Image (cartoon, grey):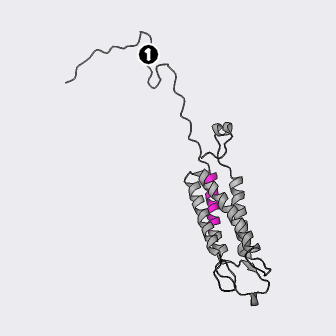
Amino acid sequence: MRHAWPVTSPLPPGVEYQTGAPLGGSEPPPPAPPPRPSRRPLVLAGILLVAAVLCGAASLMTWRDYGNVVTAGNSTGWNLPDGSIGRGWLAIALGITFAVAGVLVAAERERPGRITAVIGGVTAMVLAVVEWGVTDGPSRTGPGLGLWLLFLIGFGVVLAVGIIAPETSPVDVKRGDRLSG
């Protein structure tokens, strides 16, 4: 059963109620569009994952250039000409390091991912130089394609981390911290 209640307005006479308008009488501002997500972390994560795959490929390439392939034997990252095991596992470990750094960057943990990537890149360059210059003993050989690729991978990763800067907020710029994350 419905009751017919008298309709009384709490508004003073002459003031009309407008639907959708707040008590102040003005419309609320339209909501701001959501900010576009930055593609920088995804680009960096992609570069790091490609570097991880290339590290695996560098471990399978020749690490020495003996000039005379017939008498020199096969020297990859995994086996040396004398038959002993090489240090190709270090290239695989660097590949895993780059993959972990790429996953960290993609998972919005940019600062630890960038630090891991730079440490891995510098290690790749140092490994390539030390492997060529120190560990070959008295024989004078040039670096093979695998060592060149390992050096260039490390250089490219460090360069990419430096070029693809993270997004900065006004608070970060005021503090001077570019790697907040």
Res 175 quadrant in image: top right
Q: Measured along the vertical axis of the image, is residue 32 above or below residue 117?
A: above
Q: Quadrant of residue 93?
A: bottom right
Considering the numbered disc 1 on the image, is that residue within a helix, a strand or a loop?
loop
The quarter in which the N terminus is drawn is: top left
Which residue is at 64% across, 55% downward?
Answer: 115
Q: Residues within 10 Å of mark 1 (few under 14, many from 20)?
A: few
Q: Which residues are magenta?
A: 33-52
Residue lying at 80% horizontally and 83% vertically, measured from the top left: 67
Is 45 included in the stretch rendered in magenta? yes
Residue type marked 1: Glu
Q: Does residue 106 appear to the left or right of 176 in the view shown?
A: left
Q: Residue under label 1, please give it.
A: 16
114 or 36: nearer the viewer = 114
Q: Residue furthest left?
A: 1
Mainly helix, strand or loop, the magenta region? helix
Is residue 110 covered in magenta?
A: no
Q: Position of residue 61 (x, y in %)?
A: 68, 77
**In this orientation, which residue lies closer to the viewer: 48 or 24?**
48
* Relative image position of residue 159 (x, y in whole percent): 72, 57
